[in-house]
Image: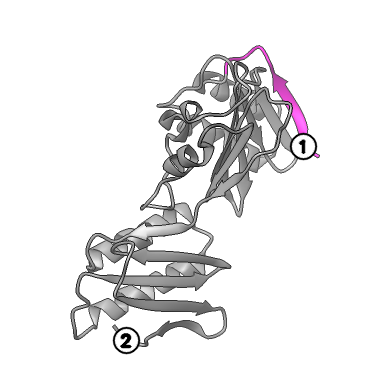
Amino acid sequence: MDTPLRYPSFQPDTENIMSVVHDLKENNFSDNTLLSNLDFAERFLRDHPLKKKSKLLVKGNYLCVQIGQSNETIFTVTSENNQACVHVCIHNIYDRKVTMYSINAGHFFNHSCQDEFKSCFTQAQEAVNEGLPRLHIKCNRFSITYTSESSNPAGPTVETKCHLKLESLTAEGLLNKKVWLQKEKPACHGLIACLDYLIKQYLTAIYSLGSSYGFVIYADKEIIKITSGENVSRQYVLLHDNDEGVSMFPPTL
């Protein structure tokens, strides 16, 4: 269980985060994951400060820092596979339903959605329809939960799928998707290896693929799609195996 370090009188802003980091270092706390996540939180919130009625929770390997005490907005930073993950919980104290008006684009700031055809923000708006007591959205390393004053806490979960848009099939376009993967899914080495393989295939291809194409990649227990649009005329499947490497079907572009 995480040992809590509480600073209830502090406003969860960058200045107070840095003050807490200084305090931890002065007292020789050695939870490097916590310090790394605090640094991430400070950078994340630098341009998008939390509202006054907010609470920041930053978790490490065995310590948890709490800054602020309001439960209206709870901003939590944790780690998974050595990468920072963000979870936001927004509680509507004035209504018994989460509605489309509860879903604010500002709640999704600094987030690179893994569905480039229909963002998690749009999917969340569509999911609430006429109102829900609760809604949870999960998109890669970001998640957000909306709750209300309803006596029924149940509600659906919207989990996005990774669907990346390739405006034009070029080496630069494929490289941009590889860069996205390296930033947003850095622990998925198989996915990145498949992009490397695809780039090499493109550079040695004899024929042009045309304008309607798609790639489905299976690796690291994940499935991602990279397409030029919702409908494709030709599709390639890439698989990554730790022993055999990358294979593609059909085998050539």
Classify residue 54 as left or right of residue 117.
right
Q: Which residues are magenta?
A: 1-11
- Say the numbered circle drawn on residue 205: none
Q: Position of residue 145 (x, y in %)?
A: 60, 35
Q: Position of residue 180 (x, y in %)?
A: 38, 55
View extreme (right): residue: 1
Residue at the spot x=28%, y=64% of the render? 228
- Viewer-proximal residue, 121 or 186? 121
For residue 133, above or below residue 50: below
Q: Secondary structure at mark 2?
A: loop
- Say the numbered circle drawn on residue 2: 1
Q: Position of residue 196 (x, y in %)?
A: 37, 72
Neighbours of disc 2 within 10 Å: few (<14), some (14-19), many (20+): few
3D distance between C-alphas at marks 1 and 2: 51 Å
Residue at the spot x=32%, y=86% of the render? 252
Neighbours of disc 1 within 10 Å: few (<14), some (14-19), many (20+): few
Whether residue 28 is visible, yes or no, is no
* Residue with the mark numbered 2: 252
Classify residue 129 as left or right of residue 21.
left
Upstream in sequence: badge 1 or badge 2: 1
> Of discs 1 and 2, which sits in the foreground?
2
Q: Is residue 111 magenta?
A: no
**Three-letter amino acid code at the position of disc 2:** Thr
Q: Secondary structure at mark 1?
A: loop
Q: Position of residue 55 (x, y in %)?
A: 62, 22
- Viewer-proximal residue, 54 or 97? 97
- Viewer-proximal residue, 185 or 147? 147
Residue at the spot x=42%, y=41% of the render? 122
